[in-house]
């Protein structure tokens, strides 16, 4: 995957799913840094460099679960899009929620895609292939714009 300067942030509260996604990224030879947050609150702290955390430099590619404690994926995306420094981050939803309300809310918040975990398969390799294709075809904003 390129560009090399993109940081991946995985928002996933389920340890098993997080490990499977990280394993698939390694299997696909993704060399980009991968950081995990267990909910939207922690993700914002990582992205903003708040609450004693180092700020994760952009550009960012976010893999966002919907069903998380404290701050769910929709609440996180709402906060992300209202933050002038973070609103350009590329976000994909990766979730078990097939609720139309969640799908509509996510696309209203400008996600690049909404992927059901069941459709991605247990090893998430299909998801990584999708991201790889997307990654190679799109132009990310310059680092100075983050």
Image: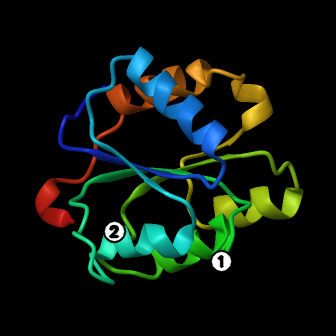
Residue neighbourhood size for the residue with mark 1, other residues' Cα within 10 Å, grouped as few (<14), some (14–19), many (≥20): few
Look at mark 2 in the image and give the residue it sits on.
47
Left or right: where 67 falls relative to 25: right
Residue 16 has which mark? none
Q: Residues within 10 Å of mark 2 (few under 14, many from 20)?
A: some
| Percent x, y of residue 44 | 43, 73
In this image, 58 relative to 10: left or right? left
Question: At x 44% / y 23%, what residue is drawn?
Answer: 133
Q: Position of residue 59 (x, y in %)?
A: 26, 54
- The image quadrant that residue 103 belongs to is bottom right
Q: Which residue is mark 1?
A: 70
Q: Quadrant of residue 77?
A: bottom right
**Quadrant of the snapshot with the C terminus:** bottom left
Q: Residue at x 33, y 18 (%)?
A: 29
Q: Is residue 140 left or right of residue 130?
A: left
Q: Residue at x 54, y 35 (%)?
A: 19
Please name which of the two marks, 2 or 1, marks the residue nearer to the observer.
1
Give the CA distance from mark 2 to mark 1. 17 Å
Q: Is the Cβ of the residue at disc 2 closer than 8 Å to that at disc 1?
A: no
Could you tell me residue 107's position as x and y percent? 66, 58
């Amino acid at each position: 995957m390129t560009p090399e300067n993109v940081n991946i942030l995985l928002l996933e509260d389920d340890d098993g799913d997080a490990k499977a996604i990280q394993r698939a990224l390694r299997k696909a030879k993704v060399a980009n840094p991968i950081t995990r947050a267990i909910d939207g609150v922690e993700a914002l702290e990582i992205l903003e460099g708040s609450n004693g955390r180092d700020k994760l430099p952009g550009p960012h590619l976010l893999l966002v679960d919907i069903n998380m404690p404290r701050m769910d994926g929709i609440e996180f995306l709402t906060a992300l899009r209202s933050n002038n420094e973070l609103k350009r981050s590329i976000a994909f939803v990766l979730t078990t929620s097939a609720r139309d309300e969640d799908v509509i809310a996510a696309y209203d918040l400008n996600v690049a895609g909404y992927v059901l975990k069941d459709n991605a398969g247990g090893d998430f390799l299909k998801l990584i292939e999708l991201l790889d294709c997307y990654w190679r075809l799109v132009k990310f904003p310059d680092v100075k714009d983050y």
